[in-house]
Image (cartoon, rainbow, N blue to C red):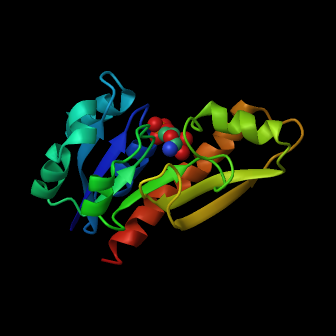
Amino acid sequence: MKNIAIFASGAGSNAQKIIDHFRNSDKGRVTVIVCNKPGAGVLQIAEREGISSIIIEREAFFHSDKYIQLLQEQQIDLVVLAGFLWKIPANLVQAFPNRIINIHPALLPKFGGKGMYGHFVHEAVIAAGEKESGITVHYVNEKYDDGETILQERCVITPDDTPETVASKVQALEHQWFPVIVERLLTTF
Ligand code: GRF
């Protein structure tokens, strides 16, 4: 049984899908939800699901080993970023080599990097006249949206698509694939 930590800053729809996927699993379980935004929807999900949650402070996150120690004490095997808006500091990346993954709502390396999240991504994809978008699940390194790709899945963009309709197509891919990829990774270590 592997222990999963989910890092999230927002609504937590991906966190919910991962929690659902592992609800009766013997492969993994979500043991903690780490959040940087008091009041975020993902914290209500943690509450409802009876999963412990931590609200992290910026100073300690970027300038101490406090959260690394906490994750190690909880014997976390995989850190899953599901809409976590801070960059992961180098000490955390190094403490969990190839054990931190992220999902990005576009086909990296395009439309990634600082500030490219949520509707900003889909607006940029449409403005660029792209014929497709999709998701990228990748390992996390010290840069935004830059680590080795694990999986990409695509969706078509039609001329009458809007950032909102692209967002819902992409979110459907996220919800379909992210839990599957997490489980697949858990079986590799
Ligand atoms: C998703 O679009 C994901 O690709 C990105 O952040 C968003 C999280 O959405 N990393 P939610 O909070 O899981 O609904």
Taking the spot 57% from the left edge, 37% from the top edge, the residue there is: 117
Query: As rendered, which of 36 and 134 lies closer to the eye?
Result: 36
Q: Quadrant of residue 64 in the image? A: top left
| Residue 88 locus on image (x, y percent) | 37, 48
Q: Using residue 88 as the reference point, say whether residue 145 is left or right of it.
A: right
Height in image: 141 above or below 19? below
The percent position of residue 104, horizontal first and vertical second, equals 55, 49
* Residue 115: % across, % down: 56, 35
72 relative to 184, above or below: above
In this rendering, the answer to whether 188 lies above or below 100 is below
Q: Residue at x 50, y 52 (%)?
A: 103
Q: Image quadrant for the N terminus?
A: bottom left
In-front residue for pair 154/130: 130
Q: In this view, which residue lies farthest toward the left?
A: 73
Residue nearer the viewer, 47 or 64 = 64
Q: In this view, does 179 lie to the left or right of 113?
A: left
Total count of labels? 0
Kindly indicate the quadrant of the structure image that contains residue 11: top left
Residue 138 image position (x, y, % from top left)? 50, 61
Q: Which residue lies furthest to the right in this view?
A: 159
The answer to whether residue 57 shows anywhere in this view is no
Q: Residue at x 30, y 35 (%)?
A: 35
Identify which residue is drawn at 40% across, 38% down: 86
Residue at the limit of the structure toward the front, as seen here: 63
Please identify the quadrant where the C terminus is shown. bottom left
Residue closest to the far bottom = 188
